[in-house]
Amino acid sequence: MLYSEKVMDHFMHPRNVGVIENADGVGEVGNAKCGDIMRIYLKIDNDIISDVKFETFGCGSAIASSSMSTEMIKGKPLSDALALTNKAVTEALDGLPAHKIHCSVLAEGAIKAAIKDYYDKNGIEYDHNVFKDVEHEHSEE
Ligand code: FES
């Protein structure tokens, strides 16, 4: 079968879908390969992600990887969320087909963009290198 059971589970029953009103950080990225869009909402208390929700126009693989990534960062410090890679997400999903890897990058990018938004809104200093990809993607739009 093309997709693992975990991918199918997270696609059929995605966790953390929706919107957070008055979110502390919102991040949106577009996928250069397919044009799909992902938005992440974060609620942050004392550097901990107390809640996270996502909305996407992406495909099933994007939904599954967003669902998995939100589960992986919920309740975690921002530093953990910043360190999350799409590789870790696809591994947690027991893999994605090679031509679907670009879909899992959406979640990683949108999480970073949401954290950057939080830092910007609160005047918190940060290392711009960490957000290079996100800033790059935005300048391409
Ligand atoms: Fe666009 Fe998967 S094809 S996110």
Image: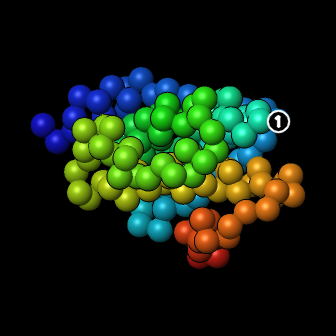
Q: Is residue 93 visible?
A: yes
**Quick one: 94 or 106, which is closer to the camera?**
94
Q: Can residue 28 be seen in this view?
A: no
Quadrant in which residue 50 is drawn: top right
Identify the residue at horizontal 25%, vertical 38% (top origin): 94
Q: Quadrant of the N terminus?
A: top left
How has the structure been colored for display?
A: rainbow
**Image spot of residue 77 (x, y percent):** 63, 39
Give the residue at mark 1: 22
Residue 43 located left or right of residue 107: right
**Quick one: 113 or 20, which is closer to the camera?**
113
Binning the other alpha carbons within 10 Å of mark 1 as few (below 14), some (14 to 19) or many (20 upward) gives few
Please state which amino acid type lies under the numbered disc 1: Asn
Residue 69 located left or right of residue 123: left
**Image spot of residue 54 (x, y percent):** 59, 38
Identify the residue at horizontal 55%, vertical 44% (top origin): 80
**Image spot of residue 103 (x, y percent):** 40, 53
**Image spot of residue 11 (x, y percent):** 37, 32
The number of discs equals 1
Quadrant in which residue 65 is drawn: top left
Please say if 2 is above or below 113. Answer: above
Please say if 101 is above or below 70. Answer: below
**Quick one: 135 or 100, which is closer to the camera?**
135
Helix, strand or loop at label 1? It is loop
Identify the residue at horizontal 37%, vertical 59% (top origin): 102
Identify the residue at horizontal 85%, vertical 54% (top origin): 121
Quadrant in which residue 73 is drawn: top right
Q: Quadrant of the C terminus?
A: bottom right
**Quick one: 30 or 120, which is closer to the camera?**
120
